[in-house]
Amino acid sequence: MSDFIPVNEPVIGEREKELVMECLNTGWISSEGPFVSQFEEAFSRRVGRNHGIACVNGTAALDIAVAALKLGPGDEVILPTFTIISCAAAIVRAGAIPVVVDADPHTWNMVPDQVAAAITPRTAAIMVVHIYGLPVDMDPILEIANRHGLAVIEDAAELIGGTYNSKPCGSFGTISTFSFYPNKHITTGEGGMVVTNDDALAERCRSLRNLCFLPNRRFVHEELGWNYRMTNLQAALGLGQLEQLDQFLSKKQWIGKKYNEHLSDCNEIRLPLINTSYAENIYWVFGFIIDESVPCNAATLISTLAKLGVGCRPFFYPMHKQPVLKDLGLFAHTSLPIAECLYERGLYIPSGLALREEQISHVSKMVRDAIGEFVS
Ligand SMILES: Cc1ncc(COP(=O)(O)O)c(C=O)c1O
């Protein structure tokens, strides 16, 4: 079991340890410590936004974003069905209505034409989610949003450091969100960030993150918020990681290149796009789709690979199939075949920043061997 290659392993350097030790040595461990605002400033500058609001995780960042925009009962929010539950949960928790669209079979991202077709008089916002390493085609989405006067929430959790037409992911939304879970391009253990250029929205986000204390009358509340504050310890880790973001991006792209070299002639799987006309893939994870000709689904291949010592994960289970959302009466007659197929036949293999060349060769060989068990 010691040779097991996990699906993710982060890289934590000396700089992060030095900064975290500074928190421990000075006693500044809570959200009051100085690294939180330093991390917010450095991160929002990197993304090209005026404000950064650090919080406990990417799920909380979405809750804050939805609440800051005052989305609620009667409001429809369009989002991809092929995403993590955090996206739909934030909308549903606010009392708003999630409206899902299918994925593109090649980029795995939401399709602008389908977003346009899903607009109704009740649509209040579009939640864009960049998936697995390539961004959503933003120009047409922004054009639709402008035409209809809609807010855009841009969930860039998986594309820290990624760009769309050379502009940073996270710089497009009315409000944009990130996650710093250890499988992300930079990590704070658990953590997230909301970014925006809008002063009033930023102020609301800060308040929502901190229980909506009234500035002049502490312990008096006119609105319910959360304690979603990031600690100084997490921010210290984040600052150290952010200094290395460009190296981490190069490493992820190197991992993608190596997997492509090893697997591009494997006809039984469809590899992710290396680029599109507007972006380079930054391989948050290296996923692939099992070809229809192979009589096995992702779940079976994942358990075969686990026995061979390779940690894998299935692709997202579409939102329109989620029992918890269907129980709320949502998506009763919705069928979105691309996302359903992505879940059925898609998986990702070890893609973490600590991955070594020999591990990539080994994983690639195991992928071929595992698929070989199902084709004669
Ligand atoms: C697109 C996307 N949004 C939100 C999240 C939630 O982030 P967190 O795990 O930090 O709550 C994730 C987590 O992986 C994600 O991939």
Image (cartoon, helix red, strand yellow):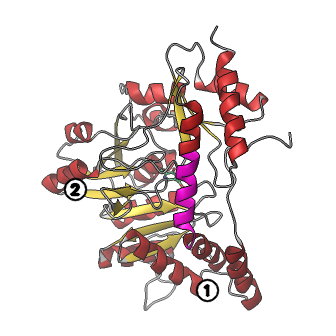
Q: Which residue is mark 1?
A: 33
Quadrant (top left/top right/bottom left/bottom right) for the C terminus: top right
Q: Which residue is mark 2?
A: 150
Residue 291 in the image: x percent, y percent?
50, 20
- SS at mark 1? loop
Q: Which residues are magenta?
A: 243-256
Looking at numbered disc 1 in the image, what kind of residue is underneath it?
A: Gly
Q: Label 2 neighbourhood size at 10 Å, few (<14), some (14-19), many (20+)?
A: some
Residue 375 visible in the shown view? yes
Vertical position of residue 297 compared to residue 251: above or below: above
How many marks can you see? 2
Q: Is mark 2 within 8 Å of ligand 1?
A: no
Left or right position of 114 against 202: left
Left or right position of 80 against 358: left
- Any magenta on residue 124? no
Q: What residue do we see at 38% from left, 52% from top?
A: 95
